[in-house]
Amino acid sequence: MQAEPKTSLVGEEYEVEIGPVAHGGHCIARTSEGQVLFVRHALPGERVVARVTEGEEGARFLRADAVRVLEASKDRVEPPCPFAGPGRCGGCDWQHAKPGAQRRLKGEVIAEQLQRLAGLTPEEAGWDGTVMPAEGDKVPAGQVPQWRTRVQYAVDASGHAGLRRHRSHEVEPIDRCLIAAEGVSELGVEQRDWSGMESVEAIAATGSQDRQVILTPKPGARLPIVELDRPVSVMRVGEKDGGVHRVHGRPFVRERADGRTYRVGSGGFWQVHTKAADTLVTAVMQGLLPRKGEMALDLYCGAGLFAGALADRLGEQGAVLGIESGKRAVEDARHNLADFPRVRIEQGKVESVLPRTGITEVDLVVLDPPRAGAGRKTVEHLSSLGARRIAYVACDPAALARDLAYFREGGYRVRTLRAFDLFPMTHHVECVAILEPAAKGL
């Protein structure tokens, strides 16, 4: 007998009391029947009317937007961005919260994930519970720091550039993005006709005048002639191979961090906040305290940011092995670090390459894994190498907490943890955890 289809609750409205913040840019509430709501555009302690955006009867939880605020939090402000709000641009989660409140909410999420997934209190993690703003990001409530150096725009059926709505492929047309760095805004992507394009990515390098536009055309579409007010390289994503190919200009941008210049190929990873690279290098080096002549690993090394910082501090007798899966990133890292003869970069997945290196012990480890984290297998291998300190750079507190639990099983404890608000107005946060053998903490 075929089960009857469940009734959709999309569009239903509930008057609810908003509870604590949850990981993902929303807060938790419950209907009068006890069903869990994940509510966006709300703040803890508020009373709102929440309209369901996803879910059906009997579902474990529903997603909803706060469409009317009946009792507002003292932390609420009018969203500075005209494109923020229920059903609109999904890029920013906390436009309606004061900057200090945003950082407190992120701190609460980190604390909850550490406790739930790693069994750690902030004190046990060596963390004072604060999330620090990046240099230059201390702006008054109602203002937005211009921090994002890489913005990927979607293109609607009319050829207008915009940003995706939350959990949707629909495009919210915009005339500006308030969090975009000045170098991105001056490209004027929002004012051009991009008919025939699926997406347009705008990049403004930090510390150089390099600007780049990456175009992803629809099948069979011709590339537009890109004429802008300043020099800019133009790349395209291939229809068949998915690779990024040069149209004109350099196939890379030059980024500056820690006193060095790094070449980053088109589509390659680099921290998107103008101050992020320097902020994270400083935190990692202060935590590791590298010594001349030591051996270090830089895992998920990208263009070689941390490998370069380590090599510079370890001296001529020190050595660094970097591992990175992206072919173009490996080429960039080898180019960027060519002046360090005792730096080697290997291509491949960390969990596959690391066991093949034959390395049985190291002094220091830096790992900056993707959002999913490093995982048990990799953490177990790292724990066996006897490093005196490990720096874990994490963009997702849940993945960080899971991996910290694995490190604890492998005999490591968290010495310190620092959190940085490198993604203002969004729910994202960056953490740097410094680990050491547990025996040293006794």
Image (cartoon, rainbow, N blue to C red):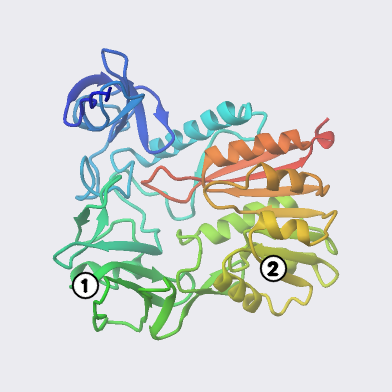
Q: Position of residue 421 (x, y in %)?
A: 47, 46
Q: Residue 347's image quarter?
A: bottom right
Residue at 63% of width from left, 64% of height from top? 324
Q: Read off the residue under disc 1.
A: 196
Residue at 60%, 43% (x, y): give it: 418
Q: Nearer the viewer, residue 199 or 335?
A: 199
Q: Please provide percent x and percent y for residue 46.
A: 28, 23
Quarter the N terminus occupies: top left
- Seen from the viewer's position, the closer of residues 356 and 278 is 356
11 relative position to 439: left or right = left
Q: Which residue is mark 2?
A: 346
Q: Residue at horizontal 19%, vertical 50%?
A: 82
Q: Quadrant of the C terminus?
A: top right
Q: Relative to residue 238, is residue 407 drawn left or right?
A: right
Number of other residues with Cα within 10 Å of mark 1, as a class: few under 14, some 14 to 19, many 20 or more: many
First in sequence: mark 1 vs mark 2: 1
Residue extending furthest toward the top: 33
Residue 47 seen from this side: no
Question: Looking at the image, which residue sits at the far front?
Answer: 1
> Does residue 434 sit above or below 220 in this rendering?
above
Does dot 1 land on a helix, a strand or a loop?
A: loop
Report crowding for label 2: few under 14, some 14 to 19, many 20 or more residues within 10 A (C-alpha).
Answer: many
Image location of residue 175, percent across then percent down: 19, 62
Residue at the outermost left position: 158
Q: Estimate the spatial distance between the alpha carbons at disc 1 and disc 2, rounded to whole Å.
A: 38 Å
Q: From the viewer's perspective, is residue 254 above or below residue 163?
A: below
Q: Is residue 139 at least partly visible in the picture?
A: yes
